[in-house]
Image (cartoon, rainbow, N blue to C red):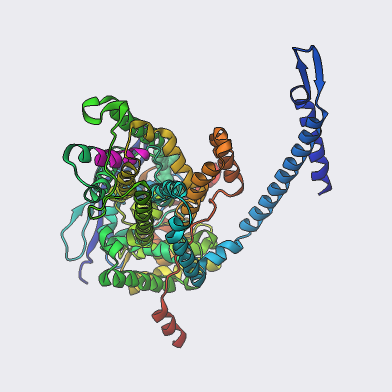
Amino acid sequence: MAEKHKLLEVKGLTMDFGGLRAVDSVSLEVHEGEIAALIGPNGAGKTTFFNCITGIYTPTKGDILLHPKGLESRRLNGLKPNKVTEMGLARTFQNIRLFHDMTVLENVMIGRHCRTTSGILHSILRGKAVREEEQQIVETSYQLLEKVGLAEFTNEFSKNLPYGAQRRLEIARALATEPFLLLLDEPAAGMNPQETADLDHLICKISEEEQIAILLIEHDMKLVMNISNPIYVMEYGKKIAEGAPQQIKDNPKVIEAYLGEETDA
Amino acid sequence: MLKDFRQSILVSIWFVFLTFPLMVVRVNTTEQLVEWRWMNLVWVAIGSFILSYLWRYMMARQQAREKVADSGIEKQSKVQLLLEDMSFRYKAMAVLLVFALIFPLVFDTYQSTIMISALIYVVLGLGLNITVGLAGLLDLGYVAFFAVGAYAYALLNYHFGLGFWTVLPVGGILGCLFGVILGFPILRLRGDYLAIVTLGFGMIVKIVLENWDDFSFGPSGIANIDRPGLFGIDMNINGSTTYIYYIMVAMVIFTIFVTMRLRNSRIGRAWIALREDEIACVAMGIDMARTKLSAYALGAFWAGMVGVLFAAKTTFINPASFTFMESAIILSIVVLGGMGSILGVILGAFILILLPEYLRAFSEYRMLAFGAAMVLMMIFRPQGIISNIRQKYEYKGLKEETDNG
Ligand SMILES: Nc1ncnc2c1ncn2[C@@H]1O[C@H](COP(=O)(O)OP(=O)(O)OP(=O)(O)O)[C@@H](O)[C@H]1O
Ligand SMILES: [Mg+2]
């Protein structure tokens, strides 16, 4: 079997907040076609890890390398978030960050921003090219809403959506930026079992149909074990294990990390 | 209901008691007499009762509305629904346009002058609405751009004899330029810091104009600025005022047209997204620096342009016209009218500029009334007179497809 193309390569990533080392030399790789998972107890540094990759924080040490297929590799350290997104790496947020006073459709349309070009003067003149581009944005966004099952809410304000729908809208918005790698931060948080099952399905669909690799953070073990391989485990900022779901389940360090958390609580 | 009634009576008794020494008793020192003005007591009682009852009633209504909003289904007010009706909008616009066009024929020059200043504030409000209302970037020094435009015309006219129409676009572009100059250092600032720096910027521009005598002629200002020309035709004051009025109407229409297009464009959506959530915005691939700078520049453009017209209208300018108070009034127009709503800002400008003009008798209380209006507004209608109406997008082709399938 041919070696799979490596899309994201993180080497020895370290992030300090003052005296606190939130992420401690973590290395991780995501290959083409994979659904990788990053798990770990609360406060392990998972979200911080995402923020470093997507340019929201500049990491203290380490390398983040992106290898888009057929394009030159780029080092992401210190790049602005919008540049990272332009390179084809999109994300969702753990604490939902939708544009609340915009409609559901407009939220997705924002995702198209970096793939469209009309400037200020052209927008004022609104020539044929601009009108066509606008219509294209609307149609693409609507298709994405259909894909994630939110077409019925198109003209609703996003703040009025149920929780599960808001999470799916975040995914649609991220997809609108045409990523080849999608980072999902706890996409199932706050969802009921039925919604989680739907999400499970949606993530697999995105991975298969769109050829988008996925790296997700999740606390719902059932979802993680179901769909993802490989799994990376973090605790106190350090990577303590990586491997296939079965290996992770049997790993004594992982069991200890999770049991330890329960006895603490 | 009964409880409110009783409470209001208590409030009114309390007020009567509090104001008794002030309102009722008066010592006439010349005749060594004490006057008892019992009628005042009655007025205070009735007045405070009505106000208190009204207050309670409004608060109750507000709470009821909040409950409805919490339950998810927001009911839009009748006015709002009417405004979303396109055919009504076109009819209303046509009526307004006709009214605006015949205005100087029906009313005298004095009325036209007042109208011109109201329209100037409409343009200023619409410009600031881009920066504050759409992009959510506070700007307390907006009047500085207005000053830039006005001084650009005054100085170019004084030194080089350039005419109004030549300088009009120059004023706008200079406004833009200053918008970018202000925008750069404050890209990373937010909230209070933004307020302080923009406030300082406004002050600096005014102080420079006041003190740099060689450049701006200091506090004495510049006089005898040319009025706008019309193919070299000589006009008397009346004719010229009417002419300026029509220029101003055209300018307002132009501003509305452009800001409307901008709002419903790719850039406009980026501005609104920036206002809603900066981090999500950059994570979705929007260049924050560029978006912010464009919001400052395009907001300032209108102030610069209308500044040129202001100088041409008054034929005399000095730094006293560009105080912080002006910035505050323009900001009030935007907030009162409804952040991001074009119609709301226009209404806000007319209310805030025309009311004080026609209620000259109360002009001393103008700022007090402004303050009270703002506080009441924040309590009862924080979204402004008219809240932002969202564009509905068409996606017909797709709908048919899914219907068939
Ligand atoms: N901006 C920040 N400044 C200082 N400390 C931070 C910051 N962001 C995160 N931390 C700290 O870094 C550690 C890791 O936080 P992080 O949010 O990455 O955890 P997590 O693994 O995502 O947890 P959870 O499962 O609860 O989401 C925590 O101790 C947190 O308090
Ligand atoms: Mg987290």
B6 displayed left or right of B76: right
Q: Image point 44% across, 80% down: which residue?
A: B399
In this orientation, which residue lies closer to the viewer: A73 or B224? B224
Please determine whether, in this image, residue B186 is positioned above or below residue B97. above
In this orientation, which residue lies closer to the viewer: B172 or A179? B172
Residue B56, image x, y percentages = 73, 45
B321 displayed left or right of B368: left
Q: Image point 82% across, 38% down: which residue?
A: B9
Residue B190, image x, y percentages = 39, 39
In this orientation, which residue lies closer to the viewer: B137 or A151? B137
Please determine whether, in this image, residue B286 is positioned above or below residue A141. above
Please determine whether, in this image, residue B138 is positioned above or below residue B387. above
Taking the view exactly as shown, the residue that stands out farthest to the bottom is B404
In this orientation, which residue lies closer to the viewer: A31 or A131? A131
Residue B375, image x, y percentages = 58, 40
Residue B397, image x, y percentages = 39, 81
Q: Image point 59% across, 38% down: which residue?
A: B372
Count how many numbered circles sit on residues in the image. 0
Instruction: Decide whether residue B147 is among the magenta residues.
Output: yes
**Quadrant containing the N terminus of chain A in the rendered view:** bottom left
Instruction: Decide whether residue B199 is among the magenta residues.
Output: no
- Most frequent secondary structure within the magenta stretch: helix
Residue B183 in sight in this render: no
Residue A14 in sight in this render: yes
Magenta residues?
A: B143-154
